[in-house]
Image (spheres, helix red, strand yellow):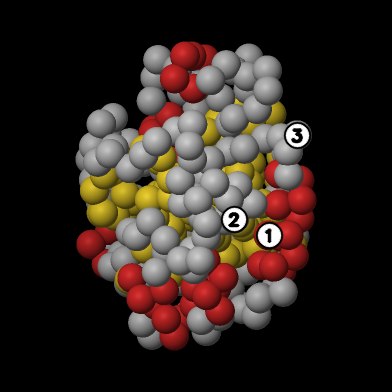
Amino acid sequence: MCTAVVRYAPGDAWPVLVTFVRDEDRARAADAPGAWWPDHPLVVGGRDRSAGGTWFAVDPRAPAAAFVTNRFEPGLTPPMQRGHHTRGTVALELLDADHVDAVDEMAPFHAVRVRRDGGRWWHWDGSATSVEDLAPGVTVIASRGPMLPGETERRARLAAQFAALTTPPLEGDSSRAWGEWIAALDGRATEAEELGALTVRSLADHPGFGTVGASLVALAADGRVRYDVNPTTDLDPGAWARVDLTPAGAT
């Protein structure tokens, strides 16, 4: 049940800040962020080794970022029972276009693309797609449906928490660049089965499932991009590292 937080502040030097916490089967192998896709040579992101796609992608030249999450909601067919086509292509496609190919063959998802002038949010429920623009302020996107117990309250709490954070300096190493944003993501104190937390320690009904890492991305009004990742299950503050975007053509 991945969770993302997007803060959009038009007029700021860094108008778009994105936090993405990835939850997944921990036995599912993945590669660290890189320029993995020949059809998208400028794009950098982590690669799922099973299907070859990604959950979070950054195009430093646009500049833009896009991500995709599952949708777990009553009435929607569970992903493992419906999809035939990987959703790992969604983020890559949305960096180039306003539509997703083969969506009818995919399990339900949420997908977001952000640029420095704002973002768009795609909702696919297995039968229809709707699209909305992200409003200024803080938006929380999560796999777990808002009608599920405690989820509306969790989203409201996260939105208030991230709205209260100051804009980080975004210079230097990860700790200095992101400051209190990294502290807000620290999941070392998260308890098992704590569904209200941003990170997932463990779930009794899904053994081996939980948080596998996180990404932080900032888009500046002048075209700069900052991309940092953490590959730990508890988002240990000391494990954050900046992703080098230079091989993808950034300057």
Mark 2–mark 3 CB contact (< 8 Å): no
Q: Nearer the viewer, residue 125 or 44?
A: 125
Residue 158, disc: 1
Categorize mark 3 by other alpha carbons within 10 Å: few (<14), some (14-19), many (20+).
Answer: few
Circles 3 and 1 in contact, beta carbons < 8 Å: no
Q: Residue at x 52, y 75 (%)?
A: 183
Residue drawn where x is 38% and y is 51% of the image:
212
Residue at 52% across / 56% down in the picture?
191
Return the mark for residue 147. Answer: 3
Sequence-first disc among 3 and 1: 3
Badge 2 crowding class, 10 Å Cα cut-off, few under 14, some 14 to 19, many 20 or more, is some
| Disc 1 residue type (three-letter) | Leu
Distance (Cα) linking label 2 and label 3:
17 Å
- Of mark 2 and mark 3, the one earlier in the sequence is 3
Report the residue marked by disc 2: 197
Q: Position of residue 120 (x, y in %)?
A: 64, 45
